Amino acid sequence: MLALVGTHYHFRRVVPVALRPLFGKTEFWISLKTGNKSEARLSAMTLHAQTSALFRTARTMTDPARNKPLTKDDLLALYEDIIKKQEEVLETNERKAAQDLKLEHYTASMDRYRDLLKTRAFLTYSTDALERLKQHIITLRQDMITGKIQDKASLASKTEEVERLHDTLVKLFQTGPALSQASGAVPPSHQLASSTPSPAPSVMSSPRLTEALQTALLADNQKSDATKKETARTVALFVQAFGDKPVQEITGRIAGEFRDLLFSLPSSYAKSKQDMDLNAEVERAQEFDLPTLSGKSVKNHFMRLSALWNQLIRREIAEKNPWSNWDFDLTKRTPRRAWTDDELAVLSSSAWTCSTISQATFAGITLVAAYSGMRLGEICNLRNDDIQEVDGIPCFLIRPHPKDKWTPKTEAGTRNVPIHSALLDWGILNFQKESEKFLFSELKTPKTGPRGTDFGRNFSKFKTTIGLPAAITFHSFRHTVSTRLRNQAGDLRELWIDALLGHESSHKSQGATTYLSGIEIENLRQAVEAVRYPTLFLRHKL
């Protein structure tokens, strides 16, 4: 993403293979004209968001603003516009830096000028005071010579006056010019009026974001523990990207850069540990053209920060909220759909590339999803004792396992799913091992997160590698089963399909809600067996 060429960083973005004929390039290179890595990183995040939008436009060849078709020349013009905007931003930053430097020099000059005025006032006052002291000493000496001072009391009074003036001068010279601005140290006639307003009394420095989080949010008893945890997670993500900045330094500009970063992260980042390198994740999404965080996910991060800032404003820690009134493109999420026969043929003919999960496990999990519509979490959490016969029909029993803290997603998710004859013929029951608890024992149970996370991440990577579109995912098998069953010309009832998939019934009649549990397992087997795939053939071994 970032490349250091000479003394300046450059933004590097790989053009997806399918779009290279349109742009005539394999990569975009844009000079960032800075040797500062932090500045370059922020600029690169903005450029990544802009080029991602350009790639989306190129795939449809339609102007999203005017809904008009585009030509290749139009795409190149959009690319040139990105470069032009980047140059304008750099020029604006250079002008601002020059102005800041000029202002800094002016401020330093004014400070030196004010110091000179103070010094002059100090010298003027101290010179007058020395002259008065000199005259007092001369007068005292003459009075003593001429005999004007006749008694000890008068002598003591004159001597005290001289000593008092002497002490004042000693203190004045010890403290230096700063004393010239102290109240009462210099008579009003010697104090100079400032040409600029006196600076406001200094206030307590702005706390850093993590400190403000502890103060304003975690101490708020009205927030649930879940809300506090999610807010802390969002703050940690911001700190990982921009550092633990003082609250007053977090402006709308930084909020916009954080928004661009979030939209550039792969969607899998939200489900993984948050200690991964952000730049590496952005670059991974770019290299493999992975789907990125949805507008809803980005909006949730901003809503948490906005709520935190409202607390800070009430506590007078922050002046305004930079996290409100942002657009999150909620309507632009990639739609998910069912698999086509052609796409299943591509899946079947492609070699599984993951080295930590075997071909057999990949094929077994995939075929169970395709022939049952079960969720990935339900499949990966199947125990060997979850395979039983119900009324003489082999079934997957999807049920809660409290000891392992796993339960189906919904109440309707607890159900019996007849095992498709294609799965039995393929040999799905061969995965049962007496020494193992789980059916797919090769999968590792992570310390945090749901079982099957690694498989889901590797399946997504594999799907992208073999050129399948972002609109289909592992969860699309569930859509596929639902779609194909509902399009059957036979006598399959909606209630059977809902019960098979673990959906809340779409029929809200008294009979549907009260007697749904009475659906016979034979009817569910009839629904399962209606699923057919003419192009899906996955082998146990490569």
Image: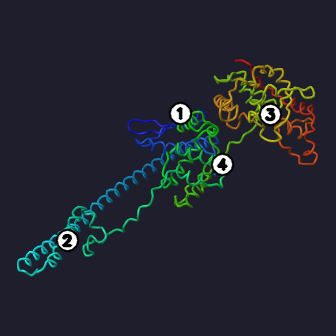
Mark closer to the chain start, 1 or 3 = 1
Three-letter amino acid code at the position of disc 4: Asp
Residues at circles 1 and 2 in contact by the CB criterion of under 8 Å: no
Residue ranking furthest to the top? 541
On the picture, is 314 further left or further right than 164? right
Residue ID for mark 4: 225
Residue ID for mark 2: 165
Q: CA distance from mark 4 to mark 3?
A: 34 Å
Mark closer to the chain start, 1 or 2 = 1
Confirm whether residue 63 shows in the render. no
Three-letter amino acid code at the position of disc 3: Gly
Confirm whether residue 345 shows in the render. yes
Front residue of 212/174: it is 174
Q: Give the percent coordinates (x, y) of residue 112.
A: 27, 60
Q: Is residue 198 shown above or below 32?
A: below
- Residue 26's disc number: 1
